[in-house]
Image: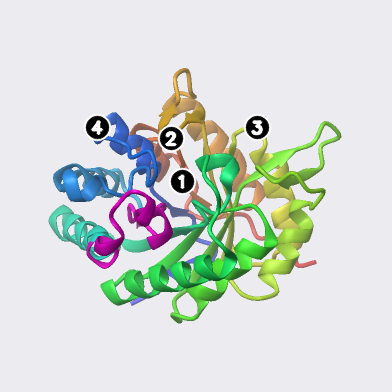
Amino acid sequence: MTTLQERLDGGEVIILDGAIGSELQRMGVPMNADAWSAPGHLTHPDATRRLHEEYIQAGVDVITTNTYSSARHNLEVAGLADRTRELNTRAVTLAQEARDRAGGTQTVYIAGALSNYGAFSVTVERPAPPLETLKASYREHAEILAEAGVDLFVQEMIRDIQQGMALLDAALATGLPVWLGFSCRTDDDGTVRFRHNPTDLTFAEGLDALTSIGGSAVTVMHSDIEVTPPALKVALERWQGPVGSYPHYGHWERPIWHSEGGPSPEEYLTLAKEWVEMGVQIIGGCCGIGVEHIRPLKEGLPTRVPVREKS
């Protein structure tokens, strides 16, 4: 059977799912002030399973576990530290059950979501744990998800080198493929930098530093839609492997995501076509980009990207 990496190496366009947290919120699952959507599959497992099923029925190749914010250092603040293994294992099980129940002939891969959520006080409004505590939390998180049976990792919302390296080391130690997900912003002069990072570090510098360590794909994710094309251009210029795009729409007022007035599914498909024409192979969505936006992609996008010139 052809592997996911072989499909990517062959230039195939891969459809990733859309938002998990904001879609669960839309379905009525309460968001936790400290661990966001993470406890949702304990209180509302049917909703989590159903969301995965909906994405599979929409034709995606990869579904993402609801584990973006479920590392121990976040669950501890939420009073759920003693359920860290149970909660993360359950997240993978629900994705596996959805894949089994959806049936069909397509091969669906399960990506374990990892992130540095909780490591930056600017977004969670609480002091960040010491680096060594975070490193231990990242290692445990990756190990639990790997043991539970994910096929790969999506390392999401990278916005600095130090935390990105710690998270990447934890994921690579499992031996599974890792897709690096960078969150970006642009300066007034158009320079692409890391989102929510006050330093002068550019996306290009951070990208080079992390991809020198490892990674199977580079994605621009949880970035504003208008920031996505210039960030993708940087990624395509500096990385010869597969590149992906899954932006967000809206804004966060902890713990609620607001996405009113976003692009229509038709508008999103038009944007996705432009990204594929640039050479982007992995297309999905983040917060505010839901099932209705993902559904048209399978039939509406080319099956392969144009051949990229080697630099």
Please say if the residues under marks 4 and 2 sit with CB atoms less than 8 Å apart. no
Secondary structure under the numbered disc 2 in the rendered image: loop
Near-viewer residue (234 or 259): 259
Query: Which residue is tagged 4?
Result: 27
Q: CA distance from mark 1 to mark 3?
A: 16 Å
The residue located at (25%, 65%) in the rendering is: 89
Asked if residue 49 can be seen in this view, the reply is no
Please say if the residues under marks 2 and 1 sit with CB atoms less than 8 Å apart. yes
Query: Which residue is tagged 1?
Result: 284
Q: From the top left corner, tell me how far across and down residue 176 is, in percent.
A: 44, 76
The residue located at (69%, 62%) in the rendering is: 161
Q: Mark 2 is on which residue type?
A: Ile
Q: CA distance from mark 3 to mark 2?
A: 14 Å
Query: Which residue is tagged 2?
Result: 289
Crowding at dot 3, Cα within 10 Å, few <14 / some 14-19 / many 20+, comes out as: few
**Magenta region, residue range:** 61-86
Secondary structure under the numbered disc 3 in the rendered image: loop
Corner quadrant of residue 28 = top left
Q: Mark 3 is on which residue type?
A: Glu
Q: Mark 1 is on which residue type?
A: Gly
Q: CA distance from mark 1 to mark 4?
A: 19 Å
Q: From the top left corner, tell me how far across and down residue 243 is, in percent.
A: 60, 57
Q: From the top left corner, tell me how far across and down residue 26 is, in percent.
A: 30, 30
Please say if the residues under marks 3 and 4 sit with CB atoms less than 8 Å apart. no
Residue 271 counted in the magenta span: no
